[in-house]
Amino acid sequence: MSTSEMEDVLGVAAAWRAAGEQVAVATVTETWGSSPRPAGSQMAVTASGRMAGSVSGGCIEGAVAEAAQTTIRSGAPQLLDFGVTNERAWEVGLACGGKVKLFVERLS
Amino acid sequence: MTPDLLAALAAARAAKRPTVLATRLPDGLQLLLPSAEAPPALAEAASRALGDDRSGTVKLADGDWFLHVHNPPVRLIVVGAVHIAQALVPFAVQLGLATTIVDPRRAFATDERFPDVAVSTDWPDEAMDRLAPDCRTAVVTLTHDPKLDDPALDRALRGAAFYIGALGSRKTHAARLARLRALGHDDAALARIHGPVGLNIAAVTAPEIALSIVAQIVAVRRGA
């Protein structure tokens, strides 16, 4: 029961890429406090707006999807921080009070 | 992530090889482990992450590395292709347990009754010898029939299964333990068997019993 057993987000992302979509994948790399999803949790996003998987309880997915669009366009990976000490995250609202760090990369 | 790396990771996962995708943060340099080319410190950290079955970030001399663990699925061996086994399968699939149903009674062990999982009609001792339960395997016996349950439990106790459960009342279970003791299993070994199987949620129906069983498997696996 590791984090990736039930949902094969990478598999979905690869299938989307193979079908010609531009795809980015966000992966939780570190968590602090009571963040809802463990390190290794993933979310895939396409330029056309499709989404699979999750990296929180739904609190930051919108902001992550936005960041993913930037990575899809530029090709540059990003390291994102969300937490209560982060003003942007406060707006986005990680209501559990936890903190997460995410890596966003494009599937080339 | 490059197409080659993605394909290599997919192949490793399909072959059920324990694999770590290592990503250096924040520049995104990536490699798959185990690999002969990996620096020793990274190889050691990846091996530890696989053993702990836990993804996470480690600080090494050349930077922070995120180690994404891709272990093969935890396995569930169910002895007895009975009604409760049918109720158990959807929970097991949902939890990502790679499930095999074992029952030599061909009328029960059919693909029609168990469309989503592997079905074996070998005798339980032969099936268990072939499946070789390890520390990432749970074994549940559901037949109530000592001819089928006992050989499976005997084999499970000789292996490293992280969870062993046996369906049956307290009285049935006491008689079962006496038979297994006669086969040479001591009290410490017999204490590994969860019997009557499942968390006590006063389950009555087959789906409720199945829920209590999977809940107990999760509790044991997560160290609750």
Image (spheres, rainbow, N blue to C red):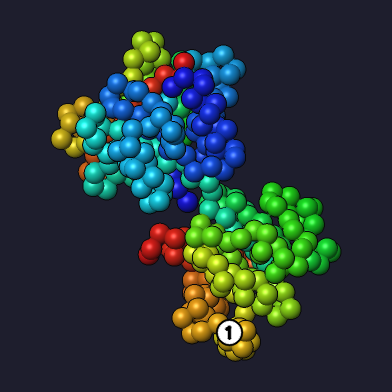
A42 over A72 or under it: above or below: below
For disc 1, the neighbor class at 10 Å (few under 14, some 14 to 19, many from 20) is: few
Q: Quadrant of residue B78?
A: bottom right
Residue B199 % position (x, y): 49, 71
Q: Quadrant of residue B82?
A: bottom right
* Image quadrant occupied by the C terminus of chain B: bottom left
Q: Is residue B171 visible?
A: no
Chain identity of mark 1: B
Q: Is residue B58 left or right of residue B48?
A: left
**Residue at position x 23%, y 47% from top?**
A33
A59 over B165 or under it: above or below: above
Q: Nearer the viewer, residue B57 or B36?
A: B36
* Image quadrant occupied by the N terminus of chain B: top left
Q: Secondary structure at mark 1?
A: loop
Most extreme residue toward the top, as rendered?
A: A74
Q: Quadrant of residue B65?
A: top left
**Which residue in the protein does label 1 denote?**
B184
Residue B83 % position (x, y): 71, 66
Residue B188 % position (x, y): 46, 81
**Residue at position x 59%, y 38% from top?**
B14
> Label 1 sits on what residue type?
Gly
Q: Is residue B120 left or right of residue A2?
A: right
**Residue at position x 48%, y 25% from top?**
B5
Q: Nearer the viewer, residue B212 or B42?
A: B42
**Residue at position x 68%, y 75% from top?**
B151
- Please give the count of numbered marks on the rendered protein: 1
Residue A24 % position (x, y): 43, 21
Q: Is residue B122 left or right of residue B202?
A: right
Q: Is residue B94 left or right of residue B38?
A: right
Q: Is residue A19 visible?
A: yes
Q: Nearer the viewer, residue B198 or A95?
A: B198
